[in-house]
Amino acid sequence: MTILQISDTHNRHRLLTNLPTADVLVHCGDFTDMGTEEEALNFLNWLIEQPYRHKIFVTGNHDLCLWEAENIEDLPNNIHFLQDRGCEIEGVRFFGLAYNHQESIIPHGVDVLITHEPPAMILDESNGIHWGNLSLRNKVLE
């Protein structure tokens, strides 16, 4: 299974015209800029149009209108909004942790963990500073 991961598109997702092929497209949040419903609907319509067999997304700190959402009605079956929940695709267990939610809800046995912020000290460095989440790091290393 091939997975293409993107994030932080901030309303610029329609500029992504030549994405590589993959089985699963994962967006790790910040698909909106101001967090409005209009921006979220624009993103969802774009996501529906994408040719990937499966599409997964979680919220980021900019996606305010969906922070408290538990589900989004009428999404196609191949689009998975993993807001503190998981799904299984072809035997691979995915789990999405919503932005700023508790790491304690991450179940054991997850193959692919999807979050907006990285665990501390794991690919989290920018401009010489580690921005990751220490609690998330501890949970991942359990």
Image (spheres, rainbow, N blue to C red):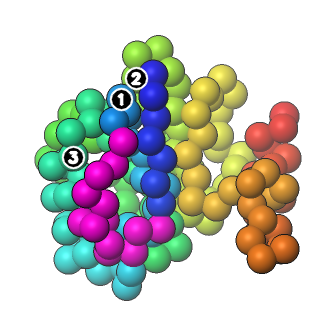
Q: Residue 88: where, in percent of width, then height?
A: 44, 24
Identify the residue at image location x=74%, y=61%.
124
> Residue under circle 3?
50
The secondary structure type at the circle numbered 2 is strand
Q: Crowding near pointer 3: few (<14 within 10 Å), some, many (20+)?
A: few
Label 3 and label 1: CA atoms lie apart by 11 Å
Q: Which residue is mark 2?
A: 89
Q: Considering the image in quadrants, where does the C terminus appear? A: top right
Quadrant in which residue 65 is drawn: bottom left
User: Is there any visible trace of residue 64 in the rendered image?
Assistant: no
Mark 1 surroundings within 10 Å by alpha-carbon count, few (fewer than 14), some (14 through 19), many (20 or more)? some
Residue 23 disc label? 1
The amino acid marked with disc number 3 is Gln
Magenta-colored span:
8-20
Amino acid type for the residue under numbered disc 1:
Asp
Residue 45, position in %: x, y?
16, 58
Above or below, 55 relative to 28: above
Look at the picture and state if 125 lies above or below 80: below
- Mark 2 crowdedness (10 Å alpha carbons): few <14, some 14-19, many ≥20: few
Q: Secondary structure at mark 1?
A: loop
Main secondary structure type of the part rendered in magenta: loop
For the residues labelled 2 and 1, say whether their Cβ atoms are less than 8 Å apart.
yes
Side of 31 relative to 94 (left or right): left
Q: Is residue 124 visible?
A: yes
